[in-house]
Image (cartoon, rainbow, N blue to C red):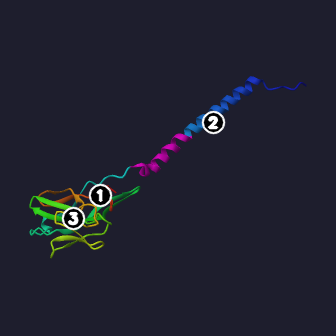
Amino acid sequence: MAKSHPHPQNSRRNFFVKAGAIAIGAVTMLVPAVSGLLVLLNPLRRKAATTGAVRVASLKALPETGEPRKFPVLATKVDAWTRTPNVPVGAVYLWRISDKEVRAFNVVCPHAGCFVDFQAAKNHYHCPCHDSTFALDGKVLDPKSPSPRALDELTAEIRNGDEIWVNFQNYRAGVKEQVRV
């Protein structure tokens, strides 16, 4: 009996059939795996949404005498997979100019990031950290003040007759220019 040797063409054909089956199987498994991974990681790839204007208070909450009042700023925080409404993100002083105009100032001092207080008896803002004072319009009162700039004014508008909306933004402390953080 003679030994039969496999024909070289059959072994090549089997190799290509097996290689093709492996390639098709890999692609078939790779497409759903990559799709699933993209869906899983989608929140991490999303850019943080800017909140824009936030409703802070009603015009009725501000005294008609023109004295500024401090209000918390509550916004919706988005963290990858979690969306949390009404989270405190800062605070503002609202100053009623008229029934149609309101000015808003961030409560953070531009010098070292401390919270300023409004002193009604002296009619100005005061930073307890470095004893700097700011006028009602936010400007630095003392030229020797260590504060590099005036209080950060924010865009405020009255909507629906008496709702005060503010474009809240924090800025870097200790620098002359307003740098968003």
Q: CA distance from mark 3 to mark 1?
A: 13 Å
Q: Residue 146: where, in percent of width, then height? A: 29, 66
For image coordinates 59% across by 37% down, the residue present is: 25
Work out whether residue 147 or residue 91 is closer to the camera in this orientation and state it: 147
Q: Residue furthest bottom?
A: 121
**Pointer 2 with pointer 1, Cβ within 8 A:** no
Quadrant for residue 21, please give it.
top right
Q: In the rendered structure, which disc, 2 or 1, sits on the residue that comes first in sequence? A: 2
Q: CA distance from mark 2 to mark 3?
A: 73 Å
Type of the residue with mark 2: Ile
2 vs 3, front mark = 3
Label 1 belongs to which residue?
176
Quadrant for residue 177, please give it.
bottom left
Q: Residue 94: where, in percent of width, then height? A: 18, 64
Q: Secondary structure at mark 3?
A: loop
Label 3 belongs to which residue?
140
Q: Residue 152: where, in percent of width, then height? A: 24, 60
Label 2 belongs to which residue?
22
Magenta region includes residue 75: no
**Pointer 2 with pointer 3, Cβ within 8 A:** no
Q: In the rendered structure, which disc, 2 or 3, sits on the residue that comes first in sequence? A: 2
Type of the residue with mark 3: Val
Which disc is residue 52 wearing? none
2 vs 1, front mark = 1
* Magenta highlight range: 29-46
Type of the residue with mark 1: Lys
Pointer 1: residues within 10 angstroms few (<14), some, or many (20+)?
few
On screen, residue 153 versus residue 6, left or right, reads: left
